[in-house]
Amino acid sequence: MLLEMPGYCAEHQRKARKQCDERRGSATSRGYGARWRQARAVFLATHPLCAACEGKGRITPAQVVDHVIPHRGDKQLFWDRNNWQALCKRCHDIKTTREDGGFGNPSNR
């Protein structure tokens, strides 16, 4: 799901996304390397349903491990399993868009 950026044509949306991605670094440099992938797999195996959908009476498979409180680079918060929740991609995208104001981290704009 690509997030729309109001006020930008399709070409400039692509350019703005690329610039934002370049500034924020790779997934591995942000902590999402092999250790994270393993922890994520274990968490999703033990929390297979989307927590947000469950709260609305829906049963949806989880695909994403979300940080309830955005870690913003804080490694202690990043690895705090009490700060993790299983979400489907749709619920994660909605939550991230709401937190980040539409596209990417506001501090990276």
Image (cartoon, grey):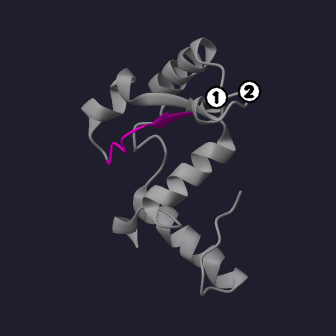
Percent position of residue 102, x then y: 53, 67
Q: Please tell me which residue lies in front, 37 or 60.
A: 60
Residue drawn at (69%, 83%) of the image: 11
**Badge 2 amino acid:** Ile
Q: Is residue 50 left or right of residue 32?
A: right
Question: Is 108 situated above or below 16?
Answer: above
* Snapshot quadrant of residue 100: bottom left
Q: Quick one: label 2, few (<14), some, or many (20+) residues within 10 Å?
A: some
Q: Are marks 2 and 1 in contact (CB under 8 Å)?
A: yes
Percent position of residue 108, x then y: 38, 67
Residue drawn at (36%, 41%) of the image: 69
**Badge 1 amino acid:** Glu
* Main SS category, magenta section: loop
Question: Is 18 situated above or below 8?
Answer: above
Residue drawn at (50%, 29%) of the image: 85
Question: Is 7 situated above or below 90?
Answer: below
Magenta residues, start to end: 65-72
**Which of the image's four quarters has the N terminus?**
bottom right
For label 1, the SS is helix
What is the C-alpha distance between the residues marked 2 and 1?
Answer: 6 Å
Residue drawn at (65%, 35%) of the image: 56
Residue that carries the numbered disc 1 in the rendered image = 54
Residue that carries the numbered disc 2 in the rendered image = 59
For label 2, the SS is loop
**Which of the image's four quarters has the C terminus?**
bottom left
- Please tell me which of labels 2 and 1 falls first in the chain: 1
Percent position of residue 57, x then y: 69, 30
Q: Quick one: label 1, few (<14), some, or many (20+) residues within 10 Å?
A: few
